[in-house]
Amino acid sequence: MTSNQLKPPQSLTLNRPLKQLNLEIETCTRCPRLIKHCNQVAIDKRAAYRDDDYWGKPVPNFGDAPAEILIVGLAPGAHGANRTGRMFTGDRSGDWLYRALHKSKLANQGVSIDRFDGTKLIGCAITAVCCCAPPDNKPTTEEINTCATFLDRAIDVYQPRVLITLGGLAWRATLKHTIERDWVIAPSPRPKFGHGAKVKLTDGRWMLGSYHPSQQNTFTGRLTEKMLDSVFKTAKRLSKT
Ligand code: SF4
């Protein structure tokens, strides 16, 4: 047997840590306020989903490792990912995100209904700053800091060339991780968030900012389909540089 035959395939070695990470996320109970909220939402339910079996716990990363592009959201939606168990799945934000991913050939389809709908990400993955749905979509600083270890490990597991942050909070949290890794070439003054903001990192990596596809942004026209498409187009281009 040659030394190559002794080595497991790369996909297996990389997916094992991802499975372990996702399992740890799903069973995490470190933020009592968030765990209580996720459970309560799953009991109360929204009338439109009263027959659904809510996930009601921390939501794991979505997408196989490695991934050239890692999308960092804020947190699962109470009746979206907290209901379906998959990041950005089952709500209007997800409709926008997966439509854009499909248009950029980063997903095999542009809909995301539930975790059994056959959606597959292609060369990208989705994670979040906070893996539990927070009341009013607002995790506390302490909760974000507590969950930071999972985001850090997601970056390790996925080894992305491009990090796309959805919203200012995800930008700041991700920037912190990249600075801690000495990836940011000019960390001071701290690069500012904006739609289309770009930070060149070390070793050909990039960080991009995008407005979050929340209804607050999409209903008001602050974020248009064209604007979101353009971020993914840029990310794809940069991931090949
Ligand atoms: S937010 Fe993160 S650290 Fe806190 S309970 Fe959820 S998964 Fe655990």
Image: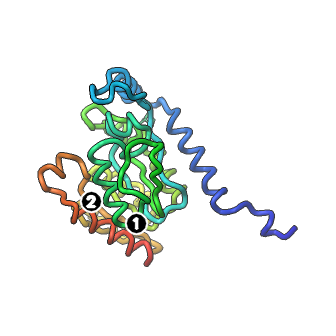
From the image, which quarter does the N terminus lie in? bottom right
Mark in the foreground, 1 or 2: 1
Q: Which residue is rendered at x = 55% and y = 38% of the image?
A: 24
SS type, badge 1? loop
Q: In which quarter of the image is residue 132?
A: top left
From the image, which quarter does the C terminus lie in? bottom left
Whether the residue carrying mark 1 lies under 8 Å from ligand 1 is answered with: no
Residue topped by disc 2: 210
Quadrant of ligand 1 in image = top left
| Residue lying at the far right of the rendered structure | 1
Q: In which quarter of the image is residue 34?
A: top left
Tell me: 56 left or right of 26. Answer: left
Residue topped by disc 1: 105
The amino acid beneath tag 1 is: Lys
| Disc on the earlier residue, 1 or 2 | 1
User: Is residue 191 in view?
Assistant: yes
